[in-house]
Amino acid sequence: MISITIKYGTGNTLTRSFATPITVGELRKDKSIQAALGFGENTVGWMNSVEQPDSINLADGDVVSIHDKACSKAGRNAGI
């Protein structure tokens, strides 16, 4: 078993134990974690201030911050 801490927003933190291996993508898509922390499907996982691909395997003690994806349509409409 490994213990992973998941953060979302200000002050929303949850620590869960998982059977190895678990990926960032599996963590983000876990409905019970989404419900507990209040985030949806349109998110990305970050570790150490760097966005992580969904395929990254997590290790015991890792801390993953969940962030909402930026809206690409807004960027296109703003001429970015």
Image (spheres, rainbow, N blue to C red):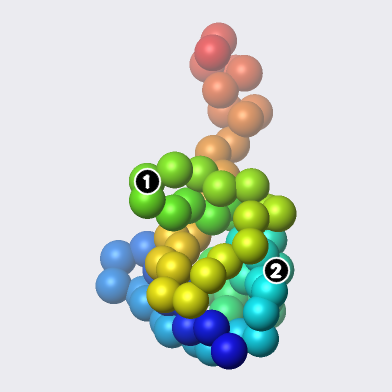
Residue depicted at 64% across the width and 28% down the height:
73
For mark 1, does the 10 Å Cα neighbourhood hold few (<14), some (14 to 19), or many (20 or more) residues? few
Residue with the mark numbered 1: 49
Dot 2 amino acid type: Glu
Instruction: Find out whether the residues at labels 2 and 1 contact each other: C-beta distance under 8 Å.
Output: no
SS at badge 2: helix
Q: Quadrant of the C terminus?
A: top right
Q: Where 62 falls versus 50 (above or below)?
A: below
Quadrant of residue 41 within the rendered picture: bottom right
Q: In the visual, does 44 lie left or right of 19?
A: left
Q: Quadrant of the N terminus?
A: bottom right
Q: In the visual, does 16 lie left or right of 57?
A: left
Q: Where 35 falls versus 46 (above or below)?
A: below
Q: Where 1 falls versus 62 (above or below)?
A: below
Q: Is residue 28 visible to the viewer in this orientation of the structure?
A: no
Looking at marks 2 and 1 on the same chain, the residue that comes earlier in the sequence is marked by 2
Dot 1 amino acid type: Ser
Q: Is residue 34 visible to the viewer in this orientation of the structure?
A: yes
Q: Which mark is residue 29?
A: none
Quadrant of residue 29 within the rendered picture: bottom right
SS at badge 1: loop
Residue depicted at 49% across the width and 60% down the height:
66
Find residue 72 and report its horizontal and vertical position in percent: 62, 30
Q: Which mark is residue 26?
A: 2
